[in-house]
Image (cartoon, rainbow, N blue to C red):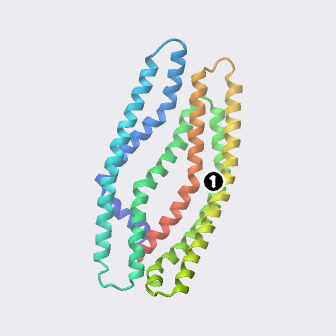
Amino acid sequence: MTGPGYIRQIIIDYKYKLLVTNILFGLEMAADLLKPYFLGKAVNDLLRGGFQSLIIFLSLHIAWMLISMLRLRYDTRTYSTIYNAIILKFLADKTHGDNISKLSAHSTLTRELTDFLEFDLVYILEAVFNIFGSLLMLFFYDTKVVLLCVTVLIPIGLISRWYGKKMSVLMFHKNNEIENQVDVISSFDKKEIHKHYETLRRWQVKITDMQAYNFGVMEIVVVVLIGVALYISTRHAGVAMQEGELIGIYFYIMKFTKGLETIPYILEKYASLKDIVQRVSNF
């Protein structure tokens, strides 16, 4: 089974459990996306001596909190069930005992796969909500800021494409070394064991260096975006824009940049997941 087919089969087998957790996640993100808007409304209302918008904002925040608590509880039950089913089936199919090193490594990699579905996928979807949801909400405040944010996506896309290719190569070599770990340790050869862990260390250092370089470049873009966007909003505001609206614009810009900062992490996880799925499904 190919990598995408392997993931697709997991989704089909557990479609109802995954549907529930994703509905809860959608509601959680929708409530979180609306919070800055109603916070701005509450500020404007309070400055005029009113409290109705504040009550709406607090009610929305409580609803978001309850949905988040429910989703977190449900997620662990769902994904632990999926992991147990996958790993037991995987081990049952490999009971002949050949290549214990790869079997052990793939068991660990399968854990990473289900962790991706439970934690990383939520993080990725949250970034998507932050980017496109913030653009949608900013449209109701200032279209110039929206155009600026969309323009920034071009250099971010080019940087991310380069980063993704580099991370795919690094993850491939690191996972190659992990597959040999049990064989190396069971050989009790001190030189081979030292060489193995030194090789793993070198690949991890290269991965971390790549993350650091990319982080620096991304943050430069983000700082410029925040500064220019707030300047445009303030200049455009004049006396017509209220304090609460400026607060809303600021929070949505921050949500947008938070989503942008997640892109390198998404690409790193995609590179790792792609390699893991290919190894597990072809073993």
Left or right of 197, for residue 93: left
Which of the 4 quarters of the picture holds residue 62? top left
Left or right of 279, for residue 165: right
Q: What residue appears at the point 55 percent right and 69 percent down from the top-left corner?
A: 171
Q: What residue appears at the point 51 percent right and 47 percent down from the top-left corner?
A: 128
Mark 1: which amino acid? Gly
Classify 257 as above or below 107: above
Q: What residue appears at the point 59 percent right and 48 percent down from the top-left corner?
A: 260
Classify 3 as above or below 181: above
Which of the 4 quarters of the picture holds residue 90? bottom left
Quadrant where the C terminus sits is bottom left
User: Which residue position is annotated with label 1?
Assistant: 157
Q: Position of residue 106 (x, y in %)?
A: 41, 73
Q: Position of residue 183 (x, y in %)?
A: 45, 84
Q: Residues within 10 Å of mark 1 (few under 14, many from 20)?
A: few
Q: Secondary structure at mark 1?
A: helix
Left or right of 10, for residue 134: right
Which of the 4 quarters of the picture holds residue 10? bottom left
Q: Position of residue 240 (x, y in %)?
A: 64, 18
Quadrant where the N terminus sits is bottom left
Classify 263 as above or below 44: below
